[in-house]
Image: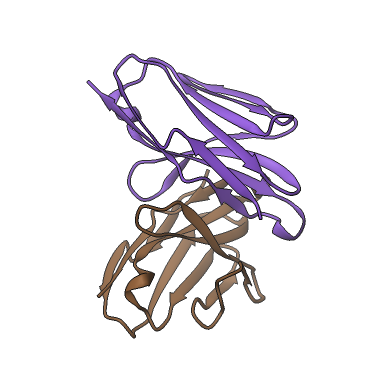
Chain colours: A purple, B brown
Amino acid sequence: EDKVVQSPLSLVVHEGDTVTLNCSYEVTNFRSLLWYKQEKKAPTFLFMLTSSGIEKKSGRLSSILDKKELFSILNITATQTGDSAVYLCAVGAGGTSYGKLTFGQGTILTVHP
Amino acid sequence: SAVISQKPSRDICQRGTSLTIQCQVDSQVTMMFWYRQQPGQSLTLIATANQGSEATYESGFVIDKFPISRPNLTFSTLTVSNMSPEDSSIYLCSVGLAGGSVYEQYFGPGTRLTVT
């Protein structure tokens, strides 16, 4: 069974700090790894990483994928209170699971002023 | 991305009743999915909504409990049938955009369901 594990489960920092969120996975027929930000109900897409794109950056957020070691990290630099949210890692598989995303349990990030 | 809407945004229902949730997208998409997020938990895929054919359900989810329709490329419904308090969750639809990767999924705003 496909498995996605995130760490830490929660994190409390102050504005300006840099944080690193971790995601490890065990998936048959890996296709892609995605990061989402969830503030209320709907997850918001951040990044998708695949074999052809193992590093992504957008503003203060960046992510890398290590396909050999089966993990990904999401970095947020110069954190702001608006970064407070649950960050979800998900992995997409092919074959009979085509299109399916398996989610990790999420990391709750709290940024204090 | 696309504009995805869901109706209702929230509802409180009595056990034994059914609720139908609608998901509408403003552009054509390749695939539509329905997820559930139980309180304090992460997202779990219920089924893939296939246009013009039966949905494909994940292990632990059955058509009698969660019937799904997808009459066209931009619209789908999920019904939660014979509800019990354990069905209290956020229900989310997601879509893979035409021309993009099916894995790059965008989510609707969600429906928060409380069953009493």
Residue A20 screen position, x and y as percent: 47, 23
Q: Foreground residue, A17 or A45?
A: A17
In the image, taking residue B47 as reference, residue A50 lies left or right, namely right
Q: Is residue A75 above or below residue B87?
A: above
User: At x 70% / y 58%, what residue is drawn?
Assistant: A97
Q: Is residue B22 above or below residue A103?
A: below
Q: Quadrant of the C terminus of chain B?
A: bottom left
In the image, taking residue A42 as reference, residue A65 lies left or right, namely right
Q: How many badges with numbers are in the image?
A: 0
Residue B18, by quadrant, is: bottom left
Residue B76 screen position, x and y as percent: 52, 68
In the image, taking residue B24 as reference, residue A83 lies left or right, namely left
Q: Foreground residue, A84 or A12?
A: A12
Residue A55, by quadrant, is: top right
Residue A1, by quadrant, is: bottom right
Residue B5 screen position, x and y as percent: 41, 57
User: At x 36% / y 15%, what residue is drawn?
Assistant: A17
Q: Foreground residue, A98 or B23?
A: A98
Residue B104 visible in the snapshot: no
User: At x 52% / y 48%, what residue is drawn?
Assistant: B106
In the rendered image, the residue lying farthest to the left is A113
Residue A102 screen position, x and y as percent: 58, 51
User: At x 48% / y 54%, what residue is drawn?
Assistant: B43
Q: Foreground residue, B27 or A77?
A: A77
Residue A47 visible in the snapshot: yes
